[in-house]
Image (cartoon, helix red, strand yellow):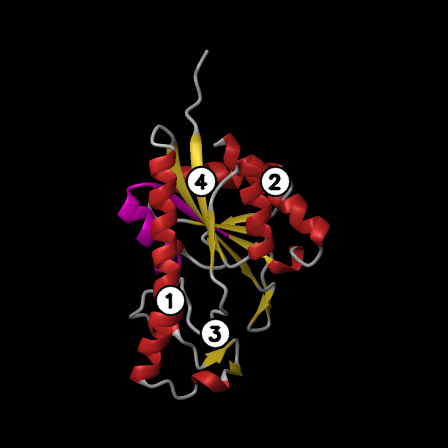
Amino acid sequence: MVRREKTNYVIQSVAHALQRAIARRLDAPWVASRWSRLLVDCNRDPRDPSLILPVSDGVAVPGNARVSAAERRRRLAAYYEPYHAAIERTVDRARRRRPDARHRLLALHSFTPVMAGVERKLDIGVLFDAYPALARRLGRTLAAHGYRVRYNQPYSGFDGLIYSARRHGRAAGIEYVELEVNNALLREPRSIERIGRDIARALRSL
């Protein structure tokens, strides 16, 4: 009999309801930003030009039209840095509480089904850079549940677009992966619960 090693997940997210559905089933700690990415994008390197967008999907963001250096620093201090500090604390606490478990970090986001007039024909994107085997296993399991799965779509992990997962996964020396879920699937509580159940089962099976 092969003994399966216990895996402990930490889940960071901006898709809050889905995040909670997954975390509840895995008994996993979670961290979520309470602020819109239009205020400051916590999944970007602070040096990234898209950290604070003046235009999003062709729509001007008035509050970002003329962001001074001082305002940029204020937003980083008030919203960005506390989020990342919370992830660091949560990962550290999880590792201390379960030192014998394998730990992984899951970043969870949602995406709009149409961007720049182009339909995105997928349900779940599995984004990765450093752990392709983990990403492929997760993707295959989700596909077996009937989801249209694509890898590094609608964004690519190789383009720096899984910054938060990479930053904290590397710092802790643990595996990490990001899921992007089509938000057309997240508009009803029953659908959120179903997807949360399926993602939790897929993670548990890895």
Tag of residue 10: none
In depth, the one of 50 and 87 nearer the eye is 87
Q: Specify the segment rendered in magenta.
A: 160-179
Choose the circle earlier in sequence order: 3 or 4: 4
Choose the circle earlier in sequence order: 3 or 1: 3
Q: Give SS at disc 4.
A: strand
Give percent across and percent down for residue 147: 62, 45
Classify residue 4 by image quadrant. top left
Which residue matches tag 3? 38
Q: Is residue 75 on the magenta stretch?
A: no
Instruction: Give the alpha-carbon distance from disc 1 to disc 2, as whole Å.
Output: 30 Å
In depth, the one of 82 and 173 nearer the eye is 82
Which residue matches tag 2? 198
User: What amino acid is at disc 3?
Assistant: Leu
Tag of residue 9: 4
Choose the circle earlier in sequence order: 1 or 2: 1
Instruction: Give the alpha-carbon distance from disc 2 to disc 4, as whole Å.
Output: 15 Å
Is residue 107 toward the left or the right of residue 171 in the image? right
Residue located at (52% from left, 38% from top): 27
User: What amino acid is at disc 4?
Assistant: Tyr
Give percent across and percent down for residue 168: 33, 51
Which residue matches tag 1? 80
Residue located at (55% from left, 61% from top): 111
Instruction: Give the alpha-carbon distance from disc 3 to disc 1, as whole Å.
Output: 12 Å
Q: Pointers 1 and 4 in contact (CB under 8 A)? A: no
